[in-house]
Image (spheres, grey):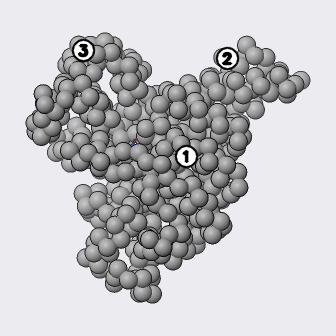
Amino acid sequence: MPDYLDRDDLTTIVPDVLAKQPVTDMHTHCYPPTFGDSSDGSGEGLLLWGIDELVTYHYLIAEVYRVVPESELPIDKFWAMTKAQQADHIWKNLFVERTPIGEACRGVLTTLHKLGLDPNEKTLDNYRKWFAQQTADQYIDRVMELANVDSITMTNPVFDDPERLMWEKNQKVGDDPRFEAVLRIDPLLRDWPGAVAKMSAWGYDVSVEFTQKTIDETKRFLNHWLDYMNAIYVAMSLPPEFRYPSDSDLAGNRFVSDILMPVLAERGLPFAMMIGCHQQVKPELRDAGDMVGKSDVQSVVSLCREFPKNKFFITMLSRENQHELCVAARKFGNLMLFGCWWFLNNPSIIEEMTRERLELLGTSFIPQHSDARVLDQLVYKWDHSRRIIGEVLIDKYNDLITAGYRVQRDHIERDARLMLRDNFRDFCKR
Ligand code: HDL
Ligand code: ZN
């Protein structure tokens, strides 16, 4: 007879099962060392890792400007500092002179602690000495082991010149077996005329008008890069104003309906839409200058209904959109919700979102992605999220025990496998 679990068992078994279940991280901004790395001194490496990158994560730049205002440190002076000087400024003001209680600060502490370092240092000197003894390639393995991540999904923005040039120079640049590529194409919806100009310069016979030639040539552009990168899905970050259908944004609608949907349906690849980012409300903050806005779930409903042969990974940035999005996912099997994105990636909101998703969708969703920009963040983002997901699951399994259901360890293992890995992998292949 299989051993049925009681409430006390759950408090140890659920965290243990989640810790042991490898995660396939479906959205990050991490790279293998072939793209150059932040320790190589060039300043162009795309793989960011180590204490100075951790402490100058753009979330922390926004937060340090809440405590040391621009009147004290003009922002152009901050940007003129070296990366180490910026990190020292942030460490002093957010970690030493104030309690690092915010989630982005806490994450740095968790990462240092799990690496076996003391997170209570008053300066970064000892951390820098320790990181100087690591090499990027071995550190990737160490971080993946600590975070129990079995695959890191990249974000590969083909319209960003530095990265595209790396691909054009060496098609194998993304061939590291620990990483998968994703074709990121924001300008094709956020700035169609600008994207047309770039594609023309690259030799594609396209125009702003949606002639058949433009449609065919843009499809050729997408197919080329999907093959070239061996991309596993296509992704875009979209503003809260995104609407489909919309007579006010014909270009965006025509790009989706006449070009992107047919290409992805033919290849069986998902389209990941990350909706709700108001870009650069404060440009001086650079990557830290973006804001959240409430988006339109009905546009997602329209897309899932109009394109039943296409698959949609959807995440929205506004907390206010989450319940309606869960209900939309109940209507469409080609809609897979994922993650607690960016300003939602905080314990209080991860708990709320995971609860409502389990209650409305069972285990048919992807509870989290790391969105890590700095490799080391995988350690804390997955530690923190596994902890919260575990607490919610314990409650839910307790509810099942109350209802007389006999919960077994292999049920929990199956649920963890689905939510942390197979819902993503299977949806990509379906
Ligand atoms: O557009 C995106 O993929 C976002 O995740 C942005 O990269 C954002 O700056 C971010 O890092 N969020 O965590
Ligand atoms: Zn991202």
Q: Determine whether, in the image, residue 332 is placed left or right of residue 217.
A: right
Q: Residue at x 53, y 66 (%)?
A: 244
- Name the image quarter holding residue 97: top left
Q: Give the amino acid at mark 1.
A: Asn
Q: Earlier in the sequence, mark 3 or mark 1?
A: 3
- Name the image quarter holding residue 65: top left
Give the Cα distance between marks 3 and 1. 37 Å
- Can I make out residue 354 in this image? yes
Q: Residue at x 41, y 26 (%)?
A: 103
Relative to 27, does residue 111 appear above or below in the rendering?
above
Q: Where residue 254 appears, x then y in whole percent?
A: 48, 75
Q: Where residue 314 appears, x then y in whole percent?
A: 55, 52
Q: Residue at x 60, y 49 (%)?
A: 325
Q: Give the amino acid at mark 2.
A: Thr
Q: Residue at x 20, y 44 (%)?
A: 284
The disc at residue 11 is 2
Q: Could you tell me which quadrant the C terminus lies in?
A: bottom right
Q: Where residue 221 appears, x then y in whole percent?
A: 39, 74
- Callout 2 secondary element: helix
Mark 3–mark 1 CB contact (< 8 Å):
no
- Callout 3 secondary element: loop
The extreme bottom residue here reads: 212
Give the Cα distance between marks 2 and 3. 36 Å
- Name the image quarter holding residue 310: bottom right
Q: Determine whether, in the image, residue 65 is placed left or right of residue 185.
A: left
- Callout 1 secondary element: helix
Q: Give the amino acid at mark 3.
A: Glu
Please tell me which residue lies in front, 32 or 97: 97
Task: Name the residue that disc number 1 marks.
Answer: 321
Mark 2–mark 1 CB contact (< 8 Å):
no
Relative to 168, does residue 390 appear above or below in the rendering?
above
Q: Earlier in the sequence, mark 2 or mark 3?
A: 2
